Image (cartoon, helix red, strand yellow):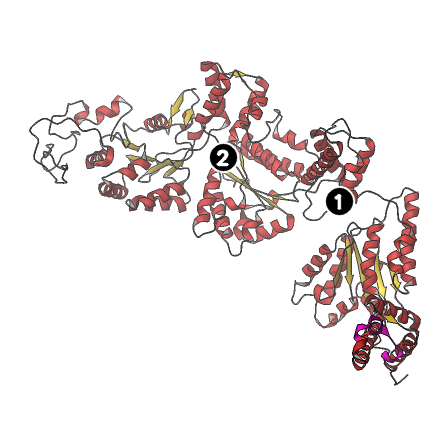
């Protein structure tokens, strides 16, 4: 017998196989209660569709059962075959309703058997007066179960029994034990000529299994459902989903021809219907909405469906998804990759149509999108859904975009169910999971269970599901490596990398957003916005939002403009409407050297430092006068003994570079060897990169940088830190200033450790030892900070003490640090002097805050 073509009833039934070889066939899904519009333009219910499918499969007798009607038929032949001998025969009183059944007394019934009296007694005395027939009680009485069992066991006529309301029957039957026994017997019988089909009004197979398990009465059916859930073939279960575009087009034509629905523009109809098909909605609901549109004298078109929000996104203008992808700016590499992907799928389709390549393994349709936010990943995923639908890879091409919270539960056993429900919604389309690495990052959660469920469904539903996972490049690499199954299912050729948009594309997005908000502006404002966008691009981080960042900027400008104009919307946008946090990207004149160095003027000495930084300000001013713009900020070497102000100047340098417009932030991150060198193989490079990223747009200050070389010849990882730092300095040129500080001789050794390191440092800034007068001045300033004064005599003795300290301990002399030590000694001697004085001295503030000569220790005596 030739296998019937099931597509004659519509796309939702094209791949359905009711003869599975399994003891049961279960029908479930969101479309169970829907209407169906076949290629013949007839509108059918599921019951009608099932009857036609079963009839086409060769079933001679098709019996239906519901809670209200235990047995009913939709055709005369099935009804006649259910009577004895295939001919109608009236049932005599006291005899069984089904002539093909018999019991201990043949077809005779024991009067009153199985009935209960009002007081609960069984088999009450037979009433003397004729009783009115009881209303049908469905499968709550054992006879209905016996009848179904009898139909299925006979092999004279091929029979299908359909539980049209399986949920209600299993929940409310009073013949539960009897029905459970029949289910168990039928499962063991092994006869595949007859069929027991059950229709469940549950959206997923997991929900069906949970419902049956909750009844705790049908163990054999529970076992069957668990086999279906965890198996790969699922030949005994059929899911009915939402309508595809072809069926919705037929529905529209039915309503147009029979009820007068009007079309706004026939050229728009195809993209409108394709957009409607991407929405998870039944044909029954679409029919109601289209009738409402007709009743309101509306026209079906792009404008109406968008204004009524019948679709989740804008209706395409009729151009192909490939053309719309090509029209997206800044996505050249993505466009080329998708074009190759489409060509490969098209070749596979045409080879199959020509009867060739049947043995070839189809290429994986699943994709990985890597890139920063706002680079068009979600938009391209929707275009991929359309493209796959047109190529026949997917039936609907809709896109489901779940949050991770929709995939992962907070309790054992919940994750697989949630993930399966999301996949069921995506069947026939694309499941797009953004920031998918969030699943593998859940070390104490159930993310891995979600991944395992996805891997299984990718295999089980490989002809009905396309999975696209997306996120930051580095994290997506880690995500794919976290599970071998992921690597095997995502080909290297299917990893599409989305670049950041360039400044020109970003500016176009910004201006388009401002236009969409209804704003106007001058060419001067456009130029200032260009500077802002360029600055944002040049200083972007790994989380840069691209198009999202531009929309956020447009919103910020709009908010500032609205606050300024106070309702006078005719006024254009001005530069002042660019919020301050964005105006920092605008070019500004280099400050006067004297003003720039004001912070250093507060420090004692440091003439070489002031010369270098002042020279940078002068150079920038000249470049601006020549319209040459700015230049990358230089990396600096601070060379000198301890206590000469290197750390202090590094902190000031960040703010100076910010004032010059060379750095956006100017913050300073202070590090040492412990912050950069790891303890085991592979630990050092990430630590260096992490430190560098924390200092971007500011200063990375490495004190005693030569300590990185300590132990490098004996197997530690200092050399790896130096090599990584050298690469990072070049990679982030313009956004990072590295200031390395240390003793002169040791810093020479540090520079020799990497041939490219010395060339990275543009200026070497010497920090000489402070002279004795400078040290005394530092002492006075430190004391003043504490509210104290140093007399001339105390200053003279302090100079002698400092000279003696430098002479006797030259290697330990710490310049300003030694001054701090001297001040602490002087404070102690002052406190003892005050303690020995009269009590009234404690009330004399001048006495408490004035350092006298006797408060200074005697100069150290020793080697010179």
Q: Judge whether residue 861 is colored magenta.
A: yes
Q: Are marks 2 and 1 in contact (CB under 8 Å)?
A: no
Question: Which image quarter holds the C terminus?
Answer: bottom right
Distance of mark 2 from mark 1, alpha carbons?
46 Å
Extreme residue in the bottom direction:
862
Q: Is residue 396 left or right of residue 579?
A: left
Viewed as shown, does residue 223 lie left or right of 517? left
Q: Is residue 499 magenta?
A: no
Residue 395 appears at what percent x and percent y?
A: 50, 32
In this view, the residue in front, 814 or 352, is 814
User: Residue 321, how many percent across, how many down?
Assistant: 61, 30
Q: Pick the residue in front: 501 or 610.
A: 610
Seen in the picture, residue 697 relative to 31 is either above or below; the reply is below
Q: Tell me, yes or no, if residue 642 can be seen here.
A: no
Residue 200 placement: quadrant = top left
Counting from the top left corner in percent of width and height, residue 485 is at 52, 50
Q: Nearer the viewer, residue 802 or 87?
A: 802
Whole-percent x, y for residue 146 in the image = 20, 36
Label 1: which residue?
A: 581
- Disc 2 secondary structure class: loop
Q: Earlier in the sequence, mark 2 or mark 1?
A: 2
Q: Nearer the viewer, residue 229 or 539?
A: 539
Please provide the residue range marked out in magenta. Answer: 842-864
Q: Residue at x 80, y 40 (%)?
A: 531
Q: Quadrant of the N terminus?
A: top left
Dividing the picture into quadrants, the one containing residue 686 is: bottom right
Instruction: Tell me where residue 383 sits by quadrant.
Output: top right
Residue at disc 1, secondary structure: helix
At x 58%, y 53%, the residue is 481
Disc 2: which residue:
428
Which mark lies nearer to you, 2 or 1?
Answer: 1
């Amino acid at each position: 017998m030739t296998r019937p073509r099931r597509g004659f009833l519509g796309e939702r039934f094209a791949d359905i196989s009711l003869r599975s070889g399994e003891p049961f066939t279960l029908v479930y899904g969101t479309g169970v209660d829907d209407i169906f519009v076949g290629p013949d333009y007839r509108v059918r219910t599921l019951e009608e569709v099932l009857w036609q499918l079963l009839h086409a499969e060769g079933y001679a007798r098709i019996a239906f059962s519901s809670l209200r009607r235990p047995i009913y038929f939709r055709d005369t032949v099935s009804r006649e075959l259910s009577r004895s001998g295939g001919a109608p025969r009236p049932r005599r009183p006291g005899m069984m309703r089904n002539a093909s059944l018999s019991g201990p007394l043949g077809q005779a019934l024991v009067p009153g058997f199985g009935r209960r009296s009002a007081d609960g007694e069984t088999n009450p005395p037979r009433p003397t007066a004729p009783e009115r027939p009881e209303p049908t009680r469905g499968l709550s009485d054992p006879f209905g179960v016996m009848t179904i069992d009898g139909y299925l066991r006979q092999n004279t006529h091929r029979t299908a029994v359909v539980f049209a309301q399986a949920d209600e029957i299993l929940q409310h039957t009073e013949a539960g034990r009897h029905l459970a026994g029949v289910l168990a017997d039928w499962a063991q019988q092994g006869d595949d000529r007859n069929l027991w089909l059950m229709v469940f009004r549950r959206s997923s197979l997991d929900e069906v299994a949970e419902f049956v398990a909750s009844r705790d009465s049908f163990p054999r059916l529970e076992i069957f459902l668990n086999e279906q859930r965890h198996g790969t073939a699922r030949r005994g279960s059929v899911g009915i989903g939402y309508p595809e575009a072809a069926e919705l087009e037929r529905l529209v034509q039915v309503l147009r021809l029979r009820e007068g629905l009007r079309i706004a523009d026939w050229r728009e109809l195809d993209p409108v219907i394709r957009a409607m098909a991407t929405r998870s909605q039944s044909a029954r609901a679409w029919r109601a909405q289209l009738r409402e549109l007709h009743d309101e004298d509306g026209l079906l078109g792009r404008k109406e469906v968008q204004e009524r929000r019948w679709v989740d996104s804008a209706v395409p203008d009729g151009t192909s998804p490939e053309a719309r992808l090509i029209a997206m700016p800044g996505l050249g590499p993505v466009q080329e990759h998708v074009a190759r992907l489409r060509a490969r799928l098209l070749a596979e389709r045409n080879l199959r149509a020509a009867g060739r390549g049947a043995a070839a393994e189809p290429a994986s349709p699943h994709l990985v999108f890597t890139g920063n936010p706002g680079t068009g990943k979600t938009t391209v995923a929707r275009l991929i859904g359309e493209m796959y639908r047109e190529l026949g890879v997917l039936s609907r091409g809709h896109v489901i975009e779940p949050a991770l919270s929709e995939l992962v539960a907070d309790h054992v056993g919940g994750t697989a169910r949630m993930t399966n429900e999301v996949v069921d919604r995506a069947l026939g389309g694309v499941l797009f999971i953004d920031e998918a690495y969030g699943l593998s990052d859940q070390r104490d959660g159930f993310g891995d269970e979600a991944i395992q469920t996805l891997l299984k469904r990718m295999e089980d539903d490989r002809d009905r599901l396309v999975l696209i996972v997306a996120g930051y490049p580095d994290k997506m690499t880690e995500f794919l490596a976290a599970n071998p199954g992921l690597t095997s299912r995502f080909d290297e050729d299917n990893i599409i990398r989305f670049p950041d948009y360039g400044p020109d594309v970003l500016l176009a997005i910004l201006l388009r957003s401002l236009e969409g908000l209804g704003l106007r502006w001058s060419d001067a404002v456009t130029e200032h916005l260009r500077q802002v966008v360029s600055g944002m691009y040049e200083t972007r981080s790994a989380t840069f939002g691209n198009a999202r960042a531009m929309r956020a900027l447009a919103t910020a400008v709009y908010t500032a403009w609205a606050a300024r104009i106070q309702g006078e919307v005719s006024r254009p946008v001005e530069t002042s409407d660019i919020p301050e946090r964005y105006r920092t990207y605008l070019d500004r004149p280099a400050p006067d050297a004297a003003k720039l160095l004001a912070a250093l003027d507060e420090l004692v000495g440091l003439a070489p430092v002031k010369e270098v930084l002042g020279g940078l300000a002068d150079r920038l001013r000249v470049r601006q006068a020549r319209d040459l713009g700015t230049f990358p900020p230089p990396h600096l070497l601070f060379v000198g003994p301890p206590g000469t102000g290197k750390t202090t100047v590094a902190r000031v340098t960040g703010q100076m570079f910010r004032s010059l417009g060379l750095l956006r932030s100017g913050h300073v991150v202070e590090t040492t060897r412990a912050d950069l060198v790891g303890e085991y193989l592979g630990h050092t490079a990430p630590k260096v990169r992490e430190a560098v990223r924390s200092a971007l747009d500011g200063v990375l200050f490495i004190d005693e940088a030569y300590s990185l070389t300590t132990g490098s010849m004996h197997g530690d990882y200092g050399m790896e830190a130096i090599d990584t730092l050298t690469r990072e300095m070049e990679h982030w040129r313009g956004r990072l200033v590295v200031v390395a500080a240390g003793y002169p001789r040791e810093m020479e050794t540090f520079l020799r450790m990497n041939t490219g390191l010395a060339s990275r440092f543009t200026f070497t800034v010497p920090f000489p030892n402070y002279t004795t007068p400078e040290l005394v001045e530092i002492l006075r300033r430190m004391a003043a900070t504490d509210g104290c004064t140093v007399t001339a005599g105390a200053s003279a003795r302090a100079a002698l003490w400092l000279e003696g300290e430098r002479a006797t301990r030259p290697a330990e002399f710490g310049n300003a640090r030694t001054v701090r030590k001297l001040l602490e000694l002087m404070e102690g001697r002052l406190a003892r002097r005050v303690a020995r004085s009269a009590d009234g001295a404690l009330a004399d503030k001048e006495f408490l805050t004035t350092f006298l000569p006797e408060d200074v220790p005697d100069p150290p005596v020793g080697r010179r």
